[in-house]
Amino acid sequence: QVQLVESGGGLVQAGASLRLSCAASGRTFSGYAMGWFRQAPGKEREFVTAIDWSGGRKRYAASVTGRATISRDNAKNTVLLQMNSLKPEDTAVYYCAAARDLNGEYNYWGQGTQVTVSS
């Protein structure tokens, strides 16, 4: 089991930056690829970004490419999502998730943190 807890969400104005954090506990954190997903009201959950166990490979959704940076610190069991130039359409609940590899199924999920971007 891997337990995930997100933090760092909040209400910001368009153009601002926000850094989301995901703290992991349980099984060996470094053995998992980590991803961020988001779900806006009335919409399906969507992929935002992911990072492999070493931090050497990363993937980004087109909607956040150039504005988002994912990173991880395996010593601290933490994965970060830095979001810049936030837009109102970034408003959503952001979830952290863990998978056995970058192409695998995400089996562990956090409870989410709300990000609201005002125009």
Image (cartoon, rainbow, N blue to C red):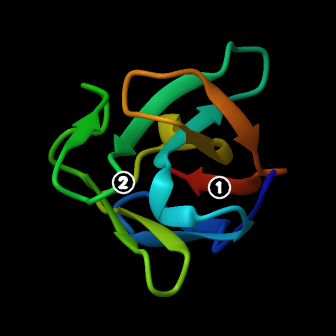
Q: Residue at x 61, y 35 (%)?
A: 38
Per the model, the C-alpha gap separating discs 2 and 1 is 26 Å
Image height of 74 relative to 82, above or below = below
Image height of 18 relative to 27, above or below = below
Image spot of residue 108 (x, y percent): 73, 41
Image spot of residue 34 (x, y percent): 48, 48
Q: Residue at x 52, y 36 (%)?
A: 100
Q: Quadrant of residue 116?
A: bottom right
Query: In the image, what residue type sits under mark 2?
Result: Trp
Apparent side of residue 92 relative to residue 118 in the rendered image (left or right)? right
Q: Which mark is residue 62?
A: none
Image spot of residue 90 (x, y percent): 50, 41
Image height of 86 relative to 9, above or below = above
- Please, what secondary structure does the residue beneath circle 1 have? strand
Q: Which mark is residue 53?
A: 2
Q: On the image, numbered disc 1 is attached to which residue?
A: 115
Apparent side of residue 32 relative to residue 111 in the rendered image (left or right)? left
Q: Nearer the viewer, mark 2 or mark 1?
A: 2
Image spot of residue 28 (x, y percent): 60, 65
Query: In the image, what residue type sits under mark 1?
Result: Val
Instruction: Please state which of residues 69 and 110 is positioned toward the viewer in this rendering.
Output: 110
Q: Residue at x 62, y 29 (%)?
A: 106
Image height of 87 relative to 11, above or below = above
